Image: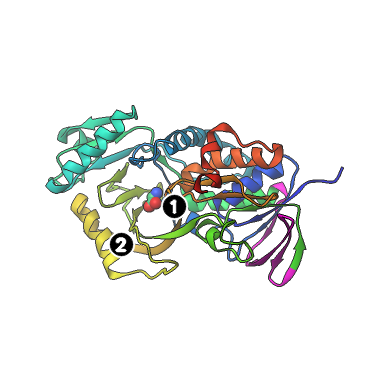
């Protein structure tokens, strides 16, 4: 029997994790990334596993999916670490949501009530408890709430670990491999044109993040409705002898993610600017000002990095998974704000879809057919 082959377009955490799972099932996987492997949204992210705190009104279908993926994280991180020897920086820090300014308190209460109404596990904290947990908070912070199940992973370490796992499992990884065109006959992809070379294919998975909506060779009615939403982020370096922050922390304006090595990741703007990756004074000012309102001690910290990335956002902010209108093309895209969080479940469901032909029930609401 000939071995099944799948060609994956996109080497972010979704493409890599799916490739790893498929290779573990003895499927031949060839993966193309148009630049360095994993240097898109997967690299730019902050690594929050915030299924609870990031839940939004209108996401009732999405919430069970992200919650299930969140429960998979401890085992997924341990398995990846065991397989590769790479620590992915999975840390059970929990997450706080606070309001540094009086004007923000309404939003804080509204979010808390919204989460409570959906039976999501959040705990209201008074000023004294907040201060005990985070002694360096601004004295103006009076209330907050806590989610004890929203943790974090170091997304860059995750990229490196998945890259190593794919290599070890025999995935054929091609960086700087631009899929310039796609040849289709009788509703099947026959060839990918990659860096000028025509490659015959059996099955194809599109996992190209924000670029998934603009792949040459697919007609508009085939392309998944995915577009980039820019986020600017920065990193400060904390003094690990006296870390300024221990939990992941949100305000209505920004989030802060303290890493095990003392980096404090601050994100993120939300901008509809196409693929313009410019870092702007306004974006950085916003991040620093809002962080300073919550944590005035950042004034003393070195600013070590700033960057921008593109969330792969779909028309309804939910992922696009499984079949397309082309028989041998499937999708794993449109993760919007949850790409890192979704990785374990996305890999499991898409691997099952490609290897067994059935899309698990938990992923069924997310096919592209919902947009027709
Ligand atoms: N999940 C965080 C963000 O999209 O900025």
Quarter location, residue 268: bottom left
User: Which is more toward the observer, 323 or 351?
Assistant: 323
> Is 178 inside the magenta-drawn segment?
yes
Where residue 133 appears, as percent x and y from the top left, is: 25, 36
Specify the quadrant that holds the N terminus: top right
Magenta stretch?
169-197
> Is 185 inside the magenta-drawn segment?
yes
Where residue 367 appears, as percent x and y from the top left, is: 55, 43
The local secondary structure at tag 2 comes to loop
Quarter location, residue 231: bottom left
Residue under the point 38% across and 33% down = 149
User: Which is more toward the observer, 332 or 166?
Assistant: 332
Q: Provide the residue designation for mark 2.
A: 302
Q: Provide the residue designation for mark 1.
A: 315
Where residue 55 appears, as percent x and y from the top left, is: 36, 40
- Whole-number angstrom distance, CA of label 1 to CA of label 2: 38 Å
Residue under the point 74% across and 56% down = 186
Magenta segment's dominant SS is strand
């Amino acid at each position: 029997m000939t071995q099944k082959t799948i060609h994956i377009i996109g080497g972010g955490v979704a493409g890599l994790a799916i490739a790893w799972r498929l290779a573990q099932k003895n499927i031949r996987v060839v993966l193309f990334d148009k630049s360095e492997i994993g240097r898109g949204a997967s690299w730019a992210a902050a690594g929050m596993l915030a299924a609870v705190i990031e839940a939004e009104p209108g996401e009732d279908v999405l919430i069970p999916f992200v919650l299930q993926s969140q429960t998979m994280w401890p085992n997924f991180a341990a398995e990846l670490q065991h397989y590769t020897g790479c620590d992915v920086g999975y840390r059970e820090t929990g997450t706080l949501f606070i309001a540094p300014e009086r004007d923000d308190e309404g939003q804080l209460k509204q979010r808390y009530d919204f989460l409570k109404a959906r039976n999501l596990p959040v705990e209201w904290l008074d000023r004294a408890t907040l201060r005990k947990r985070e002694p360096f908070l601004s004295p103006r912070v009076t209330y907050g709430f806590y989610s004890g199940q929203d943790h974090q992973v170091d997304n860059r370490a995750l990229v490196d670990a998945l890259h190593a796992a794919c290599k070890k499992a025999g995935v054929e990884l091609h960086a700087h491999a631009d899929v310039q065109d796609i040849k289709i006959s009788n509703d099947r992809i026959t060839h990918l044109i990659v860096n000028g070379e025509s490659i015959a294919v059996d099955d194809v998975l599109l996992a190209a993040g924000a670029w998934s909506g603009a792949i040459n060779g697919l007609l508009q009615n085939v392309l998944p409705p995915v577009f980039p939403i820019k986020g600017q982020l920065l990193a400060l370096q904390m003094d690990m002898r006296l870390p300024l922050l221990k939990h992941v922390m949100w305000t209505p304006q920004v989030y802060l993610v303290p890493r095990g090595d003392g980096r404090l990741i601050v994100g993120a703007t939300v901008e509809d600017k196409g693929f313009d990756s410019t870092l702007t004074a306004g974006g950085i000012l916003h991040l620093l000002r809002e962080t300073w309102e919550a944590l005035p001690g950042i004034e003393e910290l070195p600013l070590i990095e700033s960057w921008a990335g593109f969330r792969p956002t779909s028309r309804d902010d939910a992922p696009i998974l499984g079949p397309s209108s082309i028989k041998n093309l499937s999708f794993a895209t449109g993760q919007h704000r949850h790409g890192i969080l979704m990785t374990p479940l996305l890999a499991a469901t898409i691997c099952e879809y490609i290897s067994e032909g059935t899309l698990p029930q938990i992923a069924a609401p997310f096919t592209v057919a919902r947009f027709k």
